Amino acid sequence: MNSKKFVISALVLMLSSGAAWAVEPIVQRQISVSGDASIQVPPSLALITLGVTDRADEAVDAMSAVSRSMVAVVDQLQSVGIKPEDMQTQQISVNPNWTKAGSLSGGNDRKITSFTASNTLQLRVRDLDKLGEVLDQVLRAGANEFRGLQFGVVDPSEVQDQIRGAAVKDAIRKAEQLATAAGVTLGPVQSITDQGGSGGYPMAMEMARSSAMPIEAGELSFSYNVSVVFSIAETVAE
């Protein structure tokens, strides 16, 4: 019997006789923590969504009226310093208005009596000192729908960069406290998981400087979170 066949036969014999090897599981001694950081910053821009709505007997007349009014609004925005790249059309629509036929014998019959057209525009205002003036001017120019005002920052990633490192430091601080309380020595970092950030939520408000229309600018709150795993250093026997 050659050596290869002998090894295979011996292995089969050991398995059939119930021989086995017990592998001791490796227990990883670790401390897992989350690190958090937040910051409040003043907004650097405002997003405004506004629109023009009009009604006419014919769809083309309703849309023509809306188009004329929106052209006037856009011209007014440009006159107060809003650049074309900071304006974007969000929605254009025209819908029929229905009424019942009016006859008792008509049942549920309906007919179109007019049409409503609308044009919605979103714009960025980068000079918040002019925000009240901008709103006042577009309303005078013909905007008759106001669908929202939201404050933000020009570069949110720049704000998150400021607090990402602070979140890691917070995780280290927590891990050191846990290690001290448990009577162990904190080892090196095993892994860091970036949980990402969130922000743009309004905080305490203050009035923007505008005599046309007072606007609350306030501050925005940004937060960041990371998960960090540390090893627990092995204790050296004396």
Image: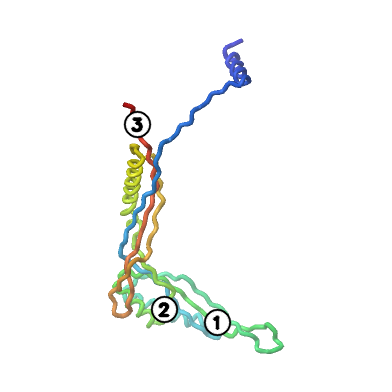
- From the image, state whether disc 1 or disc 3 is nearer to you: 3
Residue under numbered circle 1: 115
Residue 31 in picture, x, y percent from top left: 39, 41
Which quarter of the figure has residue 97?
bottom right
Residue under numbered circle 3: 235
Q: Extreme right residue here?
A: 105
- Is label 2 in a helix, a strand or a loop? helix
Q: Quadrant of the C terminus?
A: top left
Q: Earlier in the sequence, mark 3 or mark 2?
A: 2
Cα distance between the residues tagged 3 and 2: 76 Å
Q: Extreme bottom residue here?
A: 103
- Is label 3 in a helix, a strand or a loop? loop
Vertically, is 29 above or below 106?
Answer: above
Residue 125 in picture, x, y percent from top left: 34, 70
- Is label 1 in a helix, a strand or a loop? strand
Cα distance between the residues tagged 2 and 1: 20 Å
Residue under numbered circle 2: 71
Cα distance between the residues tagged 1 and 3: 81 Å
The answer to whether residue 1 is seen in the rendering is yes
Which quarter of the figure has residue 83?
bottom left
